[in-house]
Amino acid sequence: MVDVRGDDTLRVALTIEDATATDTRRPQVERGDALAGRKAKCKVCHQVFQIPAVRPKPAEVSAGGVPIYRHPKERPTPAPDVPSVTKYDKQITRHIERTIGPAPMVFHEIVSHDIHLDLHIVPPTNQEPSEEHPLGTHHYTIVTSGLSARPQNVSPQARESVSPYQELMIALPGEWPGMNRDGTFDSDAMKDDRNWWPFAFLKLVARMPHEYETFLAPGVTIPNGEKAEPFAKNTKLGCVMTFPSILSPQSKELQITDHLTIQFYALWALYPEEMQLKLDKGLSPLLDKLIEAEMTELIQVDRPNTCKKKGWFGR
């Protein structure tokens, strides 16, 4: 099967809150301004890649101390002539089946730039809640395979917790328009942006680290344009945040070798007010709000806004 849509262009501004956790998995090469742009081979996986430039200090910091990086419309370096392909596709496929569920359909890109990005479609299997799936499996999960084709330019402050090799996922309700229970798409329905935007933004975010020599981590927020415009006419959601999955918690990491781990992050769709809370006060207050409202990464276009201001008498 192939993609039914090719236009994934959405204006974005990237805002990053550095992650702090416990692990590091990065190419073992020395890096500096003098080496930026040159090719090197990882001593662990022996993959050849281009050494990224040192990340510039952010010109803007939010009220909550969150660095804000605004990327230009044009990428800083030209795209490679041949898109990179992840060498870990078989391991990723087995990891998806083991920790999320069977993926009967994989949508392969015909035309790729930077990286070849495939989407594994895991349909609902209607299982009851379990340790592997705390809320059951009544939803679709779409997982990328291709972001891990090259290492990301992880900042020194985040290298103790963030792997440069990652993949992403989204979760959609079982009744999402245009999705069939065998994992296929209804091509006509997917021509409607109200149905396609989660896929478009998933692919856009997966390419962003390589296009702009940046990285993803827990708590990174990517708005739909400067003002976090609604993704579609039927929703006011206008931002996504990378964070581990609640619906498939065992998918968090895939150990390739002793020195190389692929991390899996879900895209959590947010309202502009929720993103602003993170920028103003940090990630923890936003997580408190989401936990209190029992939210997960499941994309619901009309879900309650956890940061919506109440009117008189609490209404």
Image (tube, helix red, strand yellow):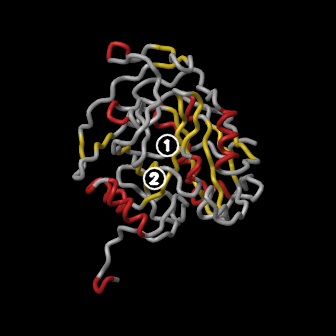
Residue 270 drawn at (x, y percent): 43, 59
Circle 2 Cα neighbour tier, 10 Å, few/some/many (<14 / 14–19 / ≥20): many
Nearer to the camera, 285 or 55: 285
Determine which residue is flagged by label 2: 240
Q: Residues within 10 Å of mark 1 (few under 14, many from 20)?
A: many
Q: Which mark is residue 174?
A: none
Residue beneath disc 1: 205
Image quarter where the N terminus lies is top right
Q: Viewed as shown, does residue 118 lie left or right of 48?
A: right
Q: Identify the residue shown where x is 70% and y is 42%.
A: 107
Identified at 38% across, 34% down, the residue is 160
- Residue plotted at (44% across, 57% down): 238
2 and 1 marks in contact (CB < 8 Å): yes
The x, y position of residue 232, in whole percent, is: 51, 60
The answer to which image quadrant residue 146 occupies is top right
Task: Identify residue type, mark 2.
Answer: Val
Amino acid type, label 1: Val
Say which element carries label 2. strand
How many labels sit on residues? Answer: 2
Answer above or below: position of 7 versus 76.
Answer: below
